[in-house]
Amino acid sequence: MSTLTAFRAATGRFLPRMVPHLHKTSSRCVIPISSVSCQHRLMTNGANFIKVEKDDTLKGVSVIKMDNKPVNSLSTPVLMEMANALDKLESDSSCRGVILTSANPGIFSAGLDIFEMYQKSPDQTNHFWKCLQEVWLKLYGSSLITIAAINGHSPAGGCLMAMSCDYRVMSSGKFTIGLNETLLGIVAPFWFSDTMLNTIGHRQTEKALQLGSLFKVDQALDIGLIDQVAEPDQIMEAAKTEMTKWLKIPDHARILTKQMLRGPTLEKLQTKRDEDVAFFTNFIQKEYIQKSLGMYLESLKKRQK
């Protein structure tokens, strides 16, 4: 048994499960009821929005590509596939690192699918939000080395996915990244803001969230929202080069350090998941929020004409 395999078996695969009171039930990760629901529905879904392949140059590294054309919107099916992909990689003892990117250069992810929040029933909205929570918990709390190769625009939920990784390299060009929810009349939940706060600090987060700021590539680099900039045709090579540095670190030391730093943020959502779902569903179904979303969707239709 390898050192990493033994460590996973002893501590549990995901960082949230390494929080003491959450880990007592099992030596493996415990999937909440909401996650089981997502997984069950995924097994009956024939879509293929998330592509996973092993890297042919780095041993122990896989690449996850989001492929939900045209803009990689994070719909319920996409989130379910992402959760399933992360589960499989986490349970693969030979996998040590993951590069998250887009199969559609020019757009990393446009964020949450607005149609999942517009004119939906409470049950549908609840399920969508639970699946998003689950993906964030798995990605932000992964014991794998996670590097985001941001090869295009990355607003809102796309920014959240990128910030959840350990390292971010972004393509040069006229791309933007940020949590711009307030521009749509939506409030970013506490775990979105906590993730950004842990990435760029309190003052920058305070301004960015209230203004719904979308940062240009050089601005994002200046404030630490991304760690590196690469030419579009070199972004995967840059991500792999960075990955080699992280692979040199003993897994047990890296994982425990990551857990120490991210554990409190992960536990905060773990203990408030139901409350967070209820708040989101109640908020998103308010008449003025639905009106705002409807106006935004109408503006998108006009742009496409």
Image (tube, rainbow, N blue to C red):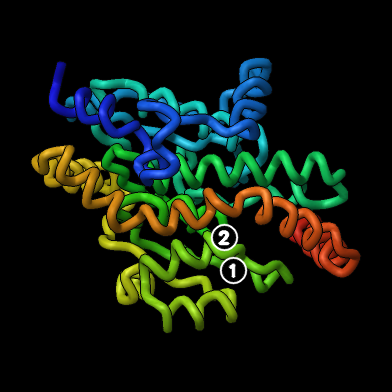
Q: Are marks 2 and 1 in contact (CB under 8 Å)?
A: yes
Q: What's the mark number on residue 156?
A: 2
On the image, the x and y values in percent for residue 238 come to 22, 48
Does 293 sit left or right of 163 as displayed? Answer: right
On the image, the x and y values in percent for residue 41 come to 68, 23
Amino acid at circle 2: Ala
On the image, the x and y values in percent for residue 179 come to 54, 66
**Is residue 208 positioned above or below 266 on the image?**
below
Residue at the farthest right position: 287
Give the image quarter of residue 100: top left
Residue 305 in sight from this viewpoint? no
**Is residue 104 positioned above or below 200 on the image?**
above
Mark 1 residue crowding within 10 angstroms, few (<14) / some (14–19) / many (20+)? many
Does 55 sit left or right of 273 as displayed? Answer: left
Between 61 and 108, which is closer to the camera in this rendering? 61
Residue lying at 46% horizontally and 27% vertically, measured from the top left: 85
- What residue would you read off at disc 1? 180
Between 174 and 109, which is closer to the camera in this rendering? 109
Mark 2 lies on a secondary structure that is loop
Residue lying at 42% horizontally and 79% vertically, measured from the top left: 202
- Which is nearer the N-term, disc 2 or disc 1? 2
Where, quadrant-wise, is the C terminus in this rendering? Answer: bottom right
CA distance separating discs 2 and 1: 5 Å
On the image, the x and y values in percent for residue 212 come to 58, 74
Amino acid at circle 1: Asn
